[in-house]
Amino acid sequence: MPLLTKSIKGTQDVLPQESHKWRYLEQSALEVAENFGFREVRTPVFEHTELFQRGVGDTTDVVQKEMYTFLDKGERSITLRPEGTAGVVRSFLEHGLFNEPMPQKLCYLTSCYRYEKPQAGRLREFHQFGVECFGTADPAADAEIIALAKQYFDFLGVRDLRLELNSIGCKECRKDYHKALHDYFSARKDKLCPTCVERLDRNPMRILDCKVPACGEIAADAPKVTDYLCDDCRAHFEQVQKYLGAMDIPFTVNPSIVRGLDYYSRTVFEFVSSSIGAQGTVCGGGRYDGLAEELGGPHTPALGFALGLERLMLLMESQGLPFPEAETCSLYIASMGEAAAQKAAELVCALRRDGIHAEFDVVGRSVKAQMKFANKLGADFTLVLGDSELESGKAVLKNMKSGETTDVELASFPGDFMRISISESLKTLEDLGVDTNIDLNALFYNND
Ligand code: HAM
């Protein structure tokens, strides 16, 4: 019979062979963020639709074309989050975090949903690592979050990412810019897609990030926002660049970066790679000084970024970067007969309580088949228990890599096994040239 159904287009399963890689990306992201003072926040996967309409902006591609929106059973319009910022700002306001000392630095790992045409690096369900920093308009904060993203990429060993930087000014200096864009696009109105014609009067900046190729070609020669910055925005942008210089972070100013979401003001930036195809923007972010107010809260200058984990994974794989090995089984205890099987279960439980990955037979296989399975698991050590081992209280521990065997007393088993397995790990470290001066006997037997 064929499968009833398959996964939805634009979604991905992460199988056990791969999940340790994801865990590595996620854990290291949180660790780097913690070193910068960011604490994790978790918000719901769905929100009231108006949050994104107001927050992300109802003239954006994301809101107009890409949201997964539905009525729930109470006839409320609900949307699966297309991005993380709006929900985090809602949460920041709802829980009064603006009363806490500023800046409030929050970070998150989330799934996001956008109904886009799937291709390499573009999915309908994707995952972001993001940070949001509230309560500071200072350009040092802009440089700080950029430094965070850079440090994460450096930690992972990612190469060849360009940092592209721009300022799109504030509401005031954007009035003149909108007029210049309106004039430019009006003269070319007949070549724009219908959505962009509609955007012309409502928000001509959104034409700049339309994905329709004809609109993109026209947008390439449109007036540049950097020519319309007011004195304050220009000074802010210069300060951001000075801080980046002080932090030794290379960047290029790219006046065509405006980002596809409405909430941005002043600094915007992207980390872009040329080695993963058309979807090369791995990370994007910027300031959104007016968003908290737009959502009904107090004026709170803020900024952040989000980094697409699928694109990061593609990039790391294209560069052949290392991931830590998946954790394997330390010890497989094979057994012959009912009494030995119960002893194996007892020993494995004791080992697991001590934090060791140990396994025993739960399928009812022959000893030969159990050993074959232990091999497949990649177990570091095996031990076979039968009637004679139970009688003598002794068994033979086999190191599966070297083939070496050691006699062990079952009575002192968890402790003995840990000593042997740690000394094996130390040997490996010594082979790698690491100085490992640890007295294992003192560690295990003299702990008073
Ligand atoms: P964004 O540029 O829409 O910004 O998305 C950030 C990152 O998410 C992109 O650079 C990309 O790596 C990844 N991404 C976006 N769409 C897809 C997709 N369909 N498939 C795979 N990956 C994708 C935001 O979401 C803002 N909330 C960032 C931000 C935070 N700005 C301030 N704070």
Image (spheres, grey):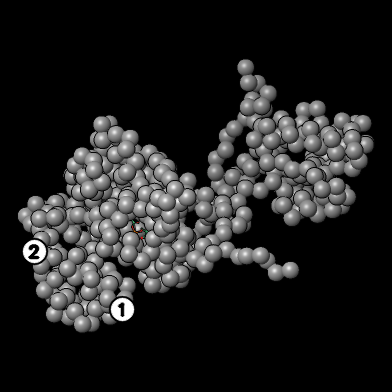
Along the viewing direction, whichever of 376 and 191 lies nearer the viewer: 191
Q: Provide the secondary structure element on which disc 2 rests.
A: helix
* Residue at the (11%, 74%) spot, across then down: 183
Seen as rendered, the residue at the extreme bottom is: 190
Where does the image place residue 196, in percent across and percent down from the top left? 25, 72
Q: Quadrant of ligand 1?
A: bottom left
Residue 307: image location, x then y, percent: 38, 56
Q: Which residue is mark 2?
A: 176
Disc 1 marks which residue?
Answer: 213
Quadrant assignment, res 4: bottom right
Q: Amino acid at mark 1?
A: Pro
Q: Amino acid at mark 2?
A: Asp
Residue 60 on image: x %, y %: 29, 63
Considering every residue shown, the one lying at the far top of the view is 448
Q: From the image, which quarter does the N terminus lie in? A: bottom right
> Is residue 252 visible in the rendered structure shown here?
no
Circle 1 crowding by C-alpha within 10 Å: few under 14, some 14–19, many from 20: few
Query: Which sits in the foreground, 78 or 276?
Result: 78
Q: Is mark 1 within 8 Å of ligand 1?
A: no
Q: Residue at x 23, y 41 (%)?
A: 297
Q: Nearer the viewer, residue 360 or 58?
A: 58
From this view, report whether residue 51 is shown above or below residue 356: below
- The reply, left or right, for residue 55 in relation to residue 338 is left
Residue ID at (36%, 53%): 49
